[in-house]
Amino acid sequence: PPGSGPPPRDEMDAEQRMRILGSEIPSSLQLALDLKQVARCDIFIGSEDAIGQTYHGRVFGGQVLAQALVAALRTVPDDLHIHSLHGYFLLVGTSGVELLFEVDRVRDGRSFATRSVKALQQNKAIFQLTASFHKPEWGPAFQMPGTELVEIVREKGFTGGVLPTPQELVAKGAQIERGTFADNKGDTQCVEISRGVWWCLRYYRHRTRLSDDTPGVHASILAWLTDSYMVEIVCVPHESRHGMEFSQRYSLDHSIHFHTLNFRADEWMVFFISTSVSGGSRGLARIQVYTLDGRLVATVTQEAVMRVPKEVAGKLREAEEKLSSDQGAGAGMGFELAERRSSRHGPGCDAQRPPAGGARQRPVAHAGARPSPRGAR
């Protein structure tokens, strides 16, 4: 029932919460994730007070996602850890308006618990999250060949499957950027490694040290960071190959599977961001999140809307219908057209961009890496 959650966490004073959130001087993201509980019910209030409003007036989806996860975490015992979540962005949120998070305790089992979280603004649901929690237990491990970081890196043109470190990239002229556009205080960091037409390799991290006292901190910060560049990567193949311009682009949903919580969001992580398919004004993006020693710790997917102006869409549809008609007019025509398209794009259409300044490459498992103790609209 509401209000029957673990009282120690719910009854902490501000100073205790700050210690759990991570440091003597918590970052703006940590403060934004310190939700206020209402009347000891499964209702929480979040805001942008600590991070500041967005420049375009829409609340950042990664913030809503992370705050909804924290609301769910506040209603489960500490020995249950997040292993998967799926959220739907329902309406555009308004920057500067508080968010109300209502948590429904869907199920509490011996090994798993399920929570549903609704985020509201001005009495309207703008986001819906389902999150599942699991009590850690042993099980056999497997990872599909080809998904190891060293294989991905080698495929993208890095000899021996080695990457330049963030420090080497910066020394050669790469910029340390903010991890998300809504990070007004500079508490997240991103360094681009390389990119192609449909993929991108980047380093991400939370800039300052986070706490080890609760597993939810690192998972929540990672969730915040993953709502970055996914909509953009869906549009890149069309923009770079055909010069297509989009009048609307925004995310529809966001899923994360945490394969382990044995990672730190305040240490550099490698994001392999890619898109596999798009059509019908929707496209799918994915992020594989790796630690520096090459462990796959999370897989993220997001579907995005990407619409071209109506007049352009009409002309393109007519061209596609004519092409389809031409393909059916003669045997083998479809193969010839496909071959013509392939040669027009050229063999180098997915060539990777070299690291900034030609930085020297290093093994993915960086020397001296410290072992991880734990885990617009």
Image (spheres, rainbow, N blue to C red):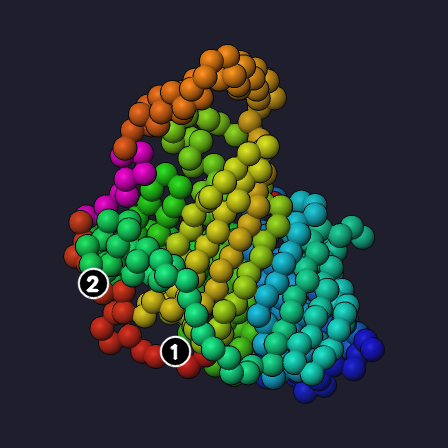
At horizontal 39% and vertical 78% (from top left) the residue drawn is 372
Q: Quadrant of the C terminus?
A: top right
Residue found at x 48% / y 51%:
286
The three-letter amino acid code for the residue at tag 2 is Arg
Q: Is residue 252 left or right of residue 197?
A: right
**Towards the viewer: 278 or 24:** 278
Magenta-drawn stretch, dominant element (helix, strand or loop): loop
Q: Please identify the residue farthest to the front as the structure is shown.
A: 331
Residue highlighted by disc 1:
372
Where is residue 232 drawn, in percent x and y?
47, 41
**Residue that carries the numbered disc 2 in the rendered image:** 362
- Circles 1 and 2 in contact, beta carbons < 8 Å: no
3D distance between C-alphas at marks 1 and 2: 20 Å
Total label count?
2
Q: Which percent across, then down, holds residue 297? A: 45, 67
| Magenta stretch bounds | 348-357
Which quadrant of the structure image shows residue 197?
top left
Q: Which mark is residue 57?
A: none
Is residue 29 visible in this depiction of the protein?
Answer: no
Instruction: Give me the residue at 59% from left, 53% from top.
Output: 254
Q: Is residue 188 visible?
A: yes
Q: Is residue 146 above or below residue 14?
A: above
In the rendered image, residue 157, in percent from the top left (x then y), is placed at 24, 49
Q: Which residue is located at x 36 percent, y 24 percent?
A: 339
Where residue 302 sits: x, y (%)?
A: 55, 50
- Residue 350 part of the magenta segment: yes
The crowding category of the residue bearing disc 2, from other C-alpha atoms within 10 Å (few below 14, some 14 to 19, many at least 20), is some
> Which three-letter amino acid code belongs to the residue tagged 1?
Ser
